[in-house]
Image: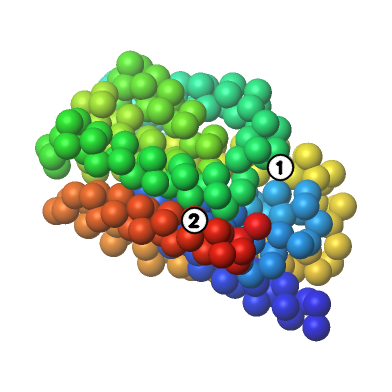
Amino acid sequence: METISLVIKSIILGIVEGITEFLPVSSTGHLVIFQNLIGFKGINPKYVEMYTYVIQLGAILAVVILYWKKIKETLVNFFPQKVGYEKSGFKFWFMIFIACIPGGVFGILLDDLADKYLFTPVSVAATLFLGAIWMMYAEKKFRNNNLKGQELNVTVKQAVIIGLFQCLAIIPGMSRSASTIIGGWVSGLSTVAAAEFSFFLAIPVMVGMSFLKILKVGGILSLTSVELISLAVGFLVSFVVALAVINKFISYLKKKPMKIFAIYRMIFAVIVLVTGALGIFH
């Protein structure tokens, strides 16, 4: 019975993760809230902390599958001598590396602090609401609708700016996707280019964060068989759902504003705060 209950909860969380990972609504924030709502928080705290990040690798795998053609191209043309520096895979992955540095440094320094104080429904809801206001302001002021922009043309300056904005994602509820897309806008990238660069950037970032969480919990071998099954189910479900979401999100961004996601964040935040006041969340 315990295994069945945990698997059902993992399916729910996998669906939540797959839908929200690449939308500017904070997948981690949603996982924190839904874990609390369905009683997932009552499990081994260290396992829950690791689970929240590791199932996100399922969604990241969806990016690798959907963008494999582009990834393969960057690997085949990795060395500048073959195609020139500007078109080389080396430049592309070097920009990804540059963008990873700020978040990596701040993530390691502030990870324990964030885990201790910011992983609560009330904190997440407040961040969702404030982040929504920021999103609407940033979109109005900085959004560049040039659909011809290419993520391969990111400069060092743009990579640094996006990387600095990504640091905000340490706060659950802020959204890594929203932060990096806004960073792309501020640096002059088109919306689609910013979103796709954000997708690629998620690959090393989430792999690194998951590895850090696995180390903190004592390694995969420290998990029980029930926990391993739960983790595998959440991973698989998030992968399948993310496959269906990513292309639709990109198609949406080509034509429409992100304001609808900001409005959703506000409504969801208010619901969480009200239900929290009624004692549904703790």
3 horizontally vs 102: left or right? right
119 horizontally vs 42: left or right? left
Q: Residue at x 43, y 23 (%)?
A: 164
Q: Nearer the viewer, residue 237 or 87?
A: 237
The residue that disc 2 covers is: 273
Residue 13 seen in this snapshot: no
Q: Residue at x 35, y 53 (%)?
A: 266
Q: Position of residue 70 (x, y in %)?
A: 35, 44
Instruction: Report crowding for label 2: few under 14, some 14 to 19, many 20 or more residues within 10 A (C-alpha).
Output: some
Q: Position of residue 251 (x, y in %)?
A: 22, 57
Q: Residue at x 46, y 67 (%)?
A: 241
90 horizontally vs 108: left or right? left
Quadrant location, the N terminus? bottom right
Give the distance between the C-alpha atoms of the residues marked 1 and 2, in whole angstroms.
28 Å
Q: Nearer the viewer, residue 16 or 74?
A: 16
Q: Is residue 253 above or below residue 112?
A: below
The first of marks 1 and 2 along the sequence is 1
**Residue 184 figure quarter:** top left
Q: Which residue is farthest front?
A: 278
Q: Nearer the viewer, mark 1 or mark 2?
A: 2
Q: Residue at x 54, y 35 (%)?
A: 170
- Type of the residue with mark 2: Leu
Q: Position of residue 246 (x, y in %)?
A: 36, 57
The residue that disc 1 covers is: 213
Residue 9 seen in this snapshot: yes
- Type of the residue with mark 1: Lys
Q: Nearer the viewer, residue 199 or 75?
A: 199
